[in-house]
Image (cartoon, rainbow, N blue to C red):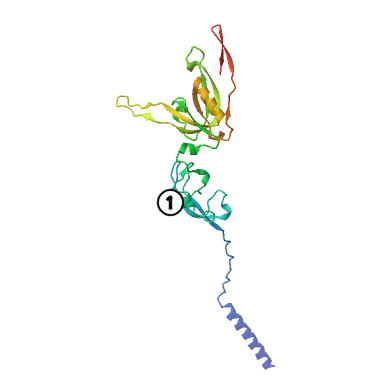
Amino acid sequence: MLRIIILVVAIGAGSLAGWLALSMQPGVAVTTVQAPAPTVAMVDVLVAAADLGQGHPLSEKSFSWKPWPVDAVSPGFITRSGQPDATKNLMGMMVRSQFVSGEPIREEKLSRTSNLLASMLSPGKRAVAIRISVESTAGGFILPNDRVDVIQTLGRPGENQASGLSRTLLTNIRVLAVDQRVEEATPKSQQPVAMGKTATLELTPPQAEAIAAAQATGILSLSLRSIADNAEQPSVRTENSAVRILRAGQSEVVKF
């Protein structure tokens, strides 16, 4: 009986010692294996190496190749795989619409002609210059690429045109260029004197005909439009209108 008691005590002591030994061992760190991030397919795209303004001739320093996600490549982008000699082929071309640094180069914004104004014209459009003054161009704040309405003013027969009637001839017209040169101020006046100015407008052939006729028969002014209205379709008013004016017992019809 004594032997049995000693055996039980020994087994219990061994079990206790084993439990104590296991509990005193440092914990085993569990390492979590993270799945590798999915790789994004890239392709080299030709981009502007610096800001390129209108009329800037392209040189070797004008562009560079930049990795671009394949899913974000638009059809108009130039890729190294599609056009490996693009940098050589585009040398000497002129920028017709400005690029910012890092912007992908697109051929529709370039021109092979040396005439900047001709390269800026949209297909089927014409460049027509009109006479303007500071007063007729929103105080001189109308600049290239603004959108304007063209207003014609007609004088009544035998009177100054300033007392005449006005109508909106064209709407939502793009301004291509504005002559903003001024004569240098003389020490006596200390004020710049405005020189003869012109604004060059982008017009369709029918609009160009309407402008030529309107300029020959009246005074043209430009009304600056909000940039929020740029999506509006340009329009031209070509029909003749007539207004009967009664003044001092006299009746006259003014056509415009």
Q: Secondary structure at mark 1?
A: helix
Q: Is residue 28 left or right of residue 88?
A: right
Residue position for label 1: 60
Quarter residue 255 falls in: top right
Three-letter code for the amino acid on which mark 1 is drawn:
Glu
Estimate the x, y position of residue 142 in percent, counting from the top left. Answer: 47, 31
Residue 139 placement: quadrant: top left
Question: Residue extending furthest top?
Answer: 249
Residue 26 picture location, percent across and down: 55, 76
Please say whether residue 116 is visible from this viewpoint: yes
Pick the quarter of the image with the C terminus: top right
Q: Position of residue 124 (x, y in %)?
A: 55, 35
Residue 218 visible from this viewpoint: no
On the rendered structure, is 118 left or right of 235?
left
Which residue sits furthest left?
187
Q: What residue is rendered at 52% in x and 23% in y? A: 213
Q: Identify the residue shown where x is 57% and y is 52%.
A: 72
Relative to residue 209, is residue 34 depicted above or below?
A: below
> Residue 19's x, y, as percent?
61, 80
Q: Nearer the viewer, residue 75 or 247?
A: 75
